[in-house]
Image (cartoon, rainbow, N blue to C red):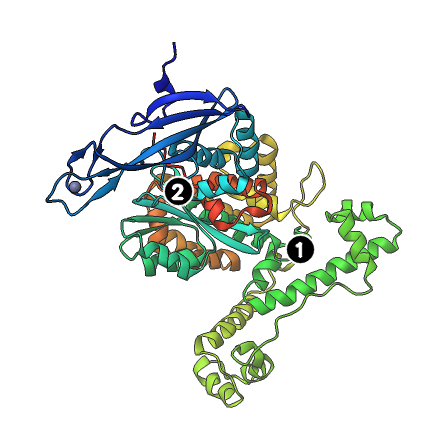
Amino acid sequence: MVSKKHWAPTASVEVGEVRQSETGAWVVSGRLAPNGICPECGASSRQRHGWRRRRIEDFPAQGQAVWIELRVCRWRCLNLDCRRRTFSDREAAVATPYARRTSRQAQLLGHMAHAAGGTPAERLLRRLGIRVSDDTILRQLLRAAQVVPRRARIIGIDDWSWRKSQNYGTIIIDLERRAVIDVLENRDVATCTDWLRHHPEVEVISRDRCGIYAQAARQGAPQAEQVADRFHIVQNLRMAIEEQMNLHGRATGRALLSDADNISTAQNLLKSRLAHRKSREEIFRTISALRQQGLTCSEIGRRTGFPRRSVAKWLQFETPPDRKRAVLKRSSAWYFEEYLKQRWENGIRSGNALLPLIQERGYEGSLSNLQRLLAGWRRAEKQEQEGPTKEDQILAPVRDPETGHAISPVIAAALCIKPRGKFTSEQARKVEVLKEGSPAFTTMRRLAMRFNGILRGRKADPLPAWIDDAIETDLAPIVRFARTLDRDIDAVRNAIEMEWSNGQAEGQINRLKTLKRAMYGRAGPNLLRARMLPLHHTN
Ligand SMILES: [Zn+2]
């Protein structure tokens, strides 16, 4: 037989009677202990001063609501030395003051909201016999989530897009326990710095290569070791390779011109920009010529390796689609290119001699900027003296012999960083073709494999030599990548030698996005945070 005590919300409640009201709800009348303990002096008292009734909702039974009618007594303190005359029963174990439901029910609502979200929790609870609005449920969740986040020694910090890549939030993960510790509303340096200042226990911060978190970590947690994220490093390398393979066919992501052309034009930004335009003109001419031969867009696409739709779009234009070129400023030596060229031809060739001349004409830039321009000219001159090499001829794009299609830079880059052992036979064939057709690809492939080896070997010592060699290649995107590594060298070294990375952040970010979508418009930062953090189960 079930005894009355099964109806008690906590052991401190003594149940007197259980009855069912006309509406079907269960009403449990109960009272607390038959004596009170004075909170001031600890004396026990059985002398009642008065009492009141408190009605609180508890777990439902048999699909019906259960109401606890609790008799709360006020007692007299019999200790004459005590300052306190009367005191009330302590009901905290049953319910918080003024709450309409027992603490255990309130917790259940919090857990439901955490697991299912407001509206689904409301429906589920209704089926169980708890009628409660989703507002209440969410309020309960927020209360449950107000627990101070756990301290973590090793954290991962990453961003996630809050609204279609417009606003970004920050997610902070305890990498040791594999749990989210906080969700921040934005990714400002100030916000992150502030968070880190409040968490001096952090010893290691794994972060992506975007400068915001590096800066925040420097300012907010100078005690912590920073670790660049391995995944992002490899991504950046892949993107640099793609950019290199892509220098000329940017609009469509396909390489139409040779690497040789890339190499000679990559020497400086302006030149590559001009070359980019040049190559677009060339592509356009080729396509127009094929069109005049009466070929269809699909056929032109097949022959040139461009998607049919791009071909069709391009043919609508009278002139090649141009892109906005950056306007040169007086702080750039290129602003004075024409004048410098004259002086150069007249035999004034040192940067130190040329600098005052352009400064007179309003140059606001540095000597090193000027030197870079001159270095490009020197190289070009040297190449000229050595005579035209076979690299100066325009080579055909690298094509897959099986399909006849040009191999896209995206695929080339992905293959470039992939270990040989993981190739399918088709991929191995493509890599061979790319190596044959593109010296730059061969160089980058060698570098990428060495880089993989360094990452796998967990030893950062070979890294500086790698960076030097990468800069030596003169392939602009690779040089840029190597320089960023160099600037962030400590964190990159840690990435190689320490086991921590932000790999687990991705899963958490996906969960966060799912939650956000499931919560429709109501996913404010507080609610999202509450649902992302693990609830601390109290019992
Ligand atoms: Zn007392």
Q: Residue furthest left?
A: 81
| Residue behind mark 1 | 249
Residue depicted at x 41% and y 25%: 28
Give the secondary structure at mark 2. loop
Residue depicted at x 38% and y 9%: 1
Image depth: mark 1 or mark 2 in front:
2
Residue depicted at x 67% and y 40%: 400
Q: How many marks?
A: 2
Q: Position of residue 30 (x, y in %)?
A: 35, 26
| Residue behind mark 2 | 98
Query: Which quadrant of the picture is home to ligand 1?
Result: top left
Disc number placed over residue 232 in the picture, else none: none
Q: Position of residue 363 (x, y in %)?
A: 51, 84
Q: Marks 1/2: CA distance?
A: 69 Å
Three-letter code, disc 1: Gly
- In the rendered structure, the answer to whether residue 9 lies left or right of residue 318 reads left
Q: Is residue 123 above or below residue 311?
A: above
Mark 1 or mark 2, earlier in chain: 2
- Look at the numbered disc 1 and say if its residue's Cβ is closer than 8 Å to ligand 1: no
Q: Position of residue 210 (x, y in %)?
A: 45, 56
Which of the 4 quarters of the picture holds residue 43?
top left
